[in-house]
Amino acid sequence: MRILIGNDIDVSIRQRKDMRSWAQRILWFAKDGDLVVLPDQPDKKFLQYVTSLTRVDPSSLRIHVPPPGDFGNYLMDRRRLSDERFVKEVAADLDEVSEIFALWPSAQISRFAEALQLTKQFSGAEFFSQGGGEVANSKANFRALAAAAGVPTAAGEVCRSIEESIDAMGRLLARSDAVVVKQAHNWAGSGNQVVIRGDSVATDHAGAKHIHYLAAGPQGIRDYWRERWEWASVGGRFPVVIEEFRQRAISIYSEYHIGDNEVRPTETGTLFYVGRWLSHQAVPLRGLSDEIHARLVNLGLQLARTYQALGYRGYFGPDALLDESGELIFTEANARVSGSAHLWGIIGHKVVDVWREPMRSVVEYHWPKKWRITGFDEFVAAVEPRQVEPR
């Protein structure tokens, strides 16, 4: 049996709100007899739906929920998994454990594994116990590791003060009409801002929650950083990335599994942005030449091996941009179970089988901003295809 843990990024890195539904994607990975730890009881109808597709007997799963923590049952905060009674409860329900699998590579998972005397079953436990999850998922660290791996990135710099940021932005805007400012820890474009000098920059394709038009001259840059440093650095806690902004590019990615002895390529896909909002993604990656596909996979493999040498273990997904000239640059790496891992790993390969004739693609659409879905039945009703009468 395996222990599957539906957690999210540590609140010490980034504060989230109610992540109970997001954590339930761990159920896609469950197999008969697994023990699943969730921040709250799963939605019964969702559990039934998922297991009907994965052909898992839901009654065989051992669902455990730790006592509420600082945020109730909304999050898996640092104290919940270390509760002594909960650890004993889980230990009493275990057979022989082959693996501990968590959505986020947290130090609390390492401590939980140690409390169960199952450290060897949590691959990378020593690295993660020392904050390795934050190290491996930082966009600032990514630039250094990509450079070490010989993997191309956009022109840019990592800055740790307002003064460094002012100088770096000035240097980049001397050669470009726009830059993108990135928080070290955020995703799907929510932590990005495109900063533009002029008004002729196309931004609709980019993942960026914010846009800022600079006032003319050096004072515009200084004023920007005095206003935005607190947001970009999360109160001075993390470094900030400033990169040259690429116009008219498409977003693609490759995925891997990093083990102790090998790095295995798994899948590739495409990300689609509409109005700078992540609209949908599709797997596998289709419509590009074999040469570009091979370049994406091989450069991603170089990155994955560098992260392996660092001590990271588990799912790994670097993102890249392909511009209209055919240049491929890498933008960040997801050293965790990303939001697309179940899309290709389970739905694409086991439920749909995208490589079997006739070949199919799996598309995941992100919910519209104005959606307020309150339950599984309401969701199914909202996405159910409707018959349209012919005119």
Image: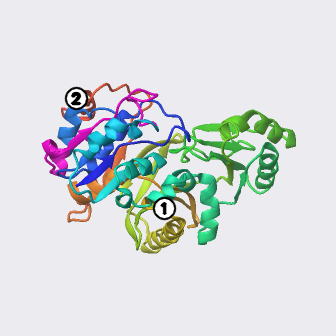
Looking at the image, can residue 247 be seen? Answer: no
Residue displayed at 45% across by 45% down: 108
- The image quarter containing residue 152 is bottom right
Q: Estimate the x, y position of residue 251 in percent, counting from the top left.
A: 50, 55
In the image, residue 182 above or below residue 293 = above
C-alpha span from label 1 to label 2: 39 Å
According to the image, label 1 marks what residue? 312
**Which-is-in-front pick, marks 1 and 2?**
1
Query: Quick check: is 59 in the magenta stretch?
Result: yes
Vertical order, 279 against 145 (above or below): above
Q: Kindly check if marks 1 and 2 are in contact, taking CB atoms under 8 A apart as contact.
A: no
Kind of residue sitting beneath label 2: Asp
Image coordinates for residue 287, horizontal then vertical, percent: 40, 63
Lateral position of residue 39 relative to residue 204, left or right: left
Task: Please state the horizontal and vertical placement of residue 365, each as a whole percent of the image.
Answer: 37, 43
Residue at 39% over, 40% down = 81
How crowded pointer 2 is (Cα within 10 Å; few <14, some 14-19, many 20+) is rated as few
Query: Could you say whether the residue bearing mark 2 is in a helix, strand or loop?
Result: helix
In this view, the residue in front, 335 or 244, is 335
Q: Which residue is mark 2?
A: 377
Q: In what quadrant of the picture does the N terminus appear?
A: bottom left
Q: Is residue 307 above or below residue 228?
A: below
Residue appearing at x 21%, y 39% in the figure: 47
- Which quadrant holds the C terminus? top left
Report the span colored magenta: 51-77
